[in-house]
Amino acid sequence: MAFPEFKLAMGQMLVEGGKIEGNLRRAERAISDASRLNCQLIVLPECSDLGWSDPSARELTEEIPGETSDRLCRAASENGIMVVAGLTEREGNRIYNSAILIDRSGKILLKHRKINVLMGVEDIYSVGNMLSVVETGFGTMGVDICADNFMNSLAIGHVLARMGAHFILSPSAWAVAQDHDNAKEPYGREWERAYSELCRLYGISVVGVSNVGWIEAGPWKGKKAIGCSLAIGPEGGVLAKGPYGHDAEALVTLMLRARPRDVKGTEYGPYLKRKGYEGP
């Protein structure tokens, strides 16, 4: 089956800890701007409502669906564009670092809860308990979040790819020390390595979108989120990058097309071996 090409926007936006109204307005503006650029899908950062690791999550987090996710669903519907956004989520007495995929009519198609929760924030976020993909007119899409794509947790991406994902879309929050010198230590090599591994093996595309801004509370206080949003294509090469910097807001666009593949189930063992993969 041949899939149509589509235009994706990486919404590298400022996210301020605990300032939900300002963050949502910026998210809505990014969605509107992407639509005006004739994009069919936009990916927004991790915890784009309250900021990753911000302690305000304990008091301000809402359920999904809820008022916060409803605003993004309305923005998707009003602008006729698919949206992937990282949001905090409350379920009972638990808080999850979640992400949703919304279709152009404003319906939530998929929800993911981050699995590879970093040490230091496990007292805020519970470990996720779901993996899923959804078929769309552009191909099958999977969603994970930031550290779910660490090299030592690529099993998550492997599962999404084996479930049929042509695209893995990953809201992220990439932060460094305030004195980090990008000229001496260019940021992003670890993500390029991890994304390229999955893309090369399965012929998929992986897109990670990070926020920008200072982290002003919580265990990562004093660090800066620096963007560098990244898209890797089916051959394992870089398709697009966002700029670096705590103030480097940007809307980066690129064209994508799903690469069909017919491998299923137990066929993946020999398929991956032919690709040079010796893992499980």
Image (cartoon, rainbow, N blue to C red):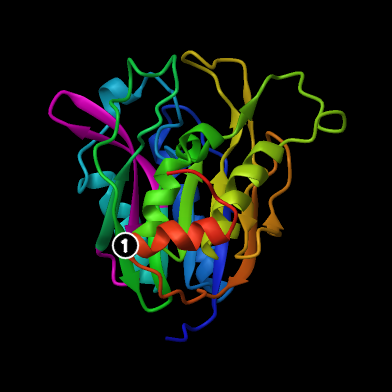
* Label 1 secondary element: helix
Tell me which corner region of the image, top left, top right, bottom left or bottom right, holds residue 93.
top left
The percent coordinates of residue 142 (x first, y second) are 38, 57
Q: Quadrant of the N terminus?
A: bottom left
Q: Which residues are magenta?
A: 85-107
Q: Residue at x 36, y 22 (%)?
A: 56
Q: Quadrant of the C terminus?
A: top left
In the shown orientation, is residue 224 left or right of residue 280?
Answer: right
Q: Is residue 110 above or below residue 171?
A: below
Name the main secondary structure of what is drawn in magenta.
strand
Residue at the right extreme of this rendering: 184
Q: Residue at x 49, y 39 (%)?
A: 146
In the shown orientation, is residue 77 left or right of residue 215?
Answer: left
Which residue is labeled 1 in the image?
A: 265
Q: How many marks?
A: 1
Residue type at mark 1? Gly
The percent coordinates of residue 137 (x first, y second) are 37, 79
Q: Is residue 59 above or below residue 44?
A: above
**Relative depth, front residue between 146 and 36:** 146
The percent coordinates of residue 253 (x first, y second) are 63, 65
Q: Residue at x 20, y 49 (%)?
A: 65
Is residue 112 within the magenta segment? no
The percent coordinates of residue 131 (x first, y second) are 29, 48
Q: Is residue 58 above or below residue 210?
A: above
Q: Residue at x 42, y 70 (%)?
A: 81
Q: Is residue 162 above or below residue 21?
A: below
Residue 71 visible here? yes
Is residue 92 within the magenta segment? yes
**Relative depth, front residue between 142 and 154:** 154
